[in-house]
Amino acid sequence: AQKITQTQPGMFVQEKEAVTLDCTYDTSDPSYGLFWYKQPSSGEMIFLIYQGSYDQQNATEGRYSLNFQKARKSANLVISASQLGDSAMYFCAMREENAGNNRKLIWGLGTSLAVNP
Amino acid sequence: DVKVTQSSRYLVKRTGEKVFLECVQDMDHENMFWYRQDPGLGLRLIYFSYDVKMKEKGDIPEGYSVSREKKERFSLILESASTNQTSMYLCASSLGGSGRRGEQFFGPGTRLTVL
């Protein structure tokens, strides 16, 4: 079963608008972390934002924020004021802290975002 | 800034050749990872290492081996390259420890084509 599900293979957004990229996860571990990465066409993976399962507040990093709904097991990425440079693949990943091997990240399949001028 | 470098951005090899992909990180990270990325399949973990000379299989280790003789360097080896190993290969490293310390830092990737 998929532990990380990104249901939107592709998304479009107008420049300067906000966009939400969905991520749902499945774990029985009470201690976990959620990561979002961006991959532009150049190929390099760029870390965007992190949310720990015990964090009281939703994470924010500049124009990126994480809409963390623990009971629903969702960790959606919100990009405000989209820019043309935001066009990229976006990946959600999870780390289970108490897993037998907790060094690994479990990855979703990604969402391709296109920002239209 | 953490820097992860990979030996080649693009590589073309022939079927049956032995292929070495090198990865170096400069931040004394404990963990290093090799992934392959194919369209529609996301990132799949091949092998990772949590210390010098220590390695563990990931989700798709068949056809690959790895070597970590020094902490900063992690090599992926294709013993006998095949066309189905044509892919983008990404190396990553992480500090080790809990929480945000699990963040992985990635190299630029190597696009390998096996003819």
Image: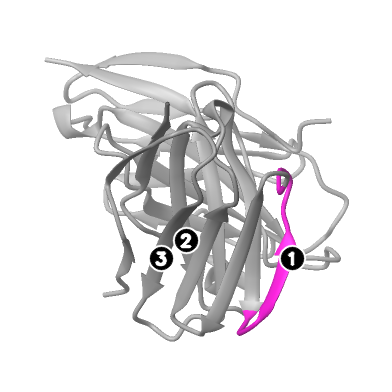
Q: Residue B101 at x, y = what percent?
A: 54, 74
Q: Residue A76 at x, y = what percent?
A: 53, 36
Q: Quadrant of the N terminus of chain B?
A: bottom left
- Magenta-tinted stretch: B51-61
* Residue occupied by mark 1: B56
Of helix, strand and loop, which one carries label 2?
A: strand
Of helix, strand and loop, which one carries label 1?
A: strand
Q: Coloring scheme of the render? A: one colour
Give the side of residue A15 with respect to residue B23, left or right.
left
* Residue occupied by mark 3: B23
The reply to whether the C-beta atoms of the residues labelled 2 and 1 are less than 8 Å apart is: no
| Chain under disc 2 | B
What residue is at 44 percent from the left and 81 percent from the top? B72
Give the side of residue B58 with respect to residue B102, left or right.
right
Quarter holding residue A5: top right
| Distance CA(mark 1)–CA(mark 3) | 17 Å
- Amino acid on which disc 3 is placed: Cys
Q: Residue B9 at x, y = what percent?
A: 27, 47
Q: Which mark is residue A96?
A: none
Give the side of residue A89 with respect to residue B78, left or right.
left
Q: Earlier in the sequence, mark 3 or mark 2?
A: 3
* Residue occupied by mark 2: B92
What residue is at 82 percent from the left and 68 percent from the top? A98
Callout 1 crowding tier (Cα within 10 Å): few <14, some 14–19, many ≥20:
some
Callout 2 crowding tier (Cα within 10 Å): few <14, some 14–19, many ≥20:
many
Of helix, strand and loop, which one carries label 3?
A: strand
